[in-house]
Amino acid sequence: MSDARYHQLASAVLAGIEATVDRWLDDDVIDIDSHRTGGLLELSFPGGSKIIINMQPPLHEIWMAAQAGGYHYRCVDERWVDTRTGDEFFAALSAQASRQGGKPLVFVAG
């Protein structure tokens, strides 16, 4: 994958997460504060926990840090999959966000 394609795909992931969180805030689903600085997106949940998602351009990966641990994802066939388990990024993000948010939350690929 070229660097340009990686940046395009990874930036779209972060933008999609931000859009979902903004929609939940507008619809009064949950109050998650999102803050993005370049390739780093921080989600702050009620109660003070956080999920950090950041781009890792040299590796062409996206990393996620949550209460349950840290995870690395690489794009394979247009899907972001965990480099160790093969789990899909949006399913894992949804599970971690639901756990930390205390209610079912579903992120989907844009």
Image (cartoon, grey):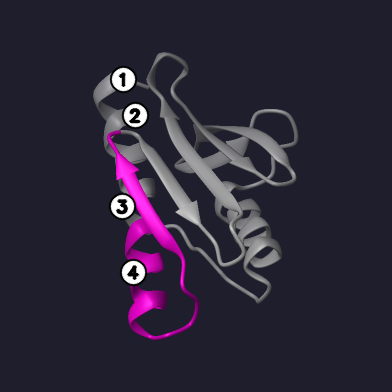
Separation (CA) of disc 3 from disc 4: 10 Å
Crowding at mark 2 (Cα within 10 Å: few <14, some 14-19, many 20+): many
Residue located beneath label 4 in the image: 22
Q: Label 3: state its secondary structure.
A: helix
Q: Amino acid at mark 3?
A: Ala
Q: First in sequence: mark 2 or mark 3?
A: 2
Which amino acid type is shown beneath numbered disc 2?
A: Tyr
The residue type indicated by label 4 comes to Asp
The residue positioned 67% from the left and 34% from the top of the image is 70
Secondary structure at badge 1 equals loop
Give, as a three-letter code, the residue at label 1: Ser
* Disc with the residue nearer the chain's start (3 vs 4): 3
Task: Identify the secondary structure beneath mark 4.
Answer: helix
Q: Earlier in the sequence, mark 1 or mark 3?
A: 1
Which quadrant of the rendered structure holds the C terminus? bottom left
Label pair 1/2, CB-CB below 8 angstroms: yes
Segment colored magenta: 17-38
Residue 18 placement (x, y as % from top left)? 35, 58
User: Which circle's residue, 4 or 1, is located before the other in the chain?
Assistant: 1
Q: Mark 2 and mark 4 in contact (Cβ < 8 Å)?
A: no
Discs 3, 4 touching: Cβ within 8 Å:
no
The residue beneath circle 3 is: 15
Q: Nearer the viewer, residue 104 or 32?
A: 32
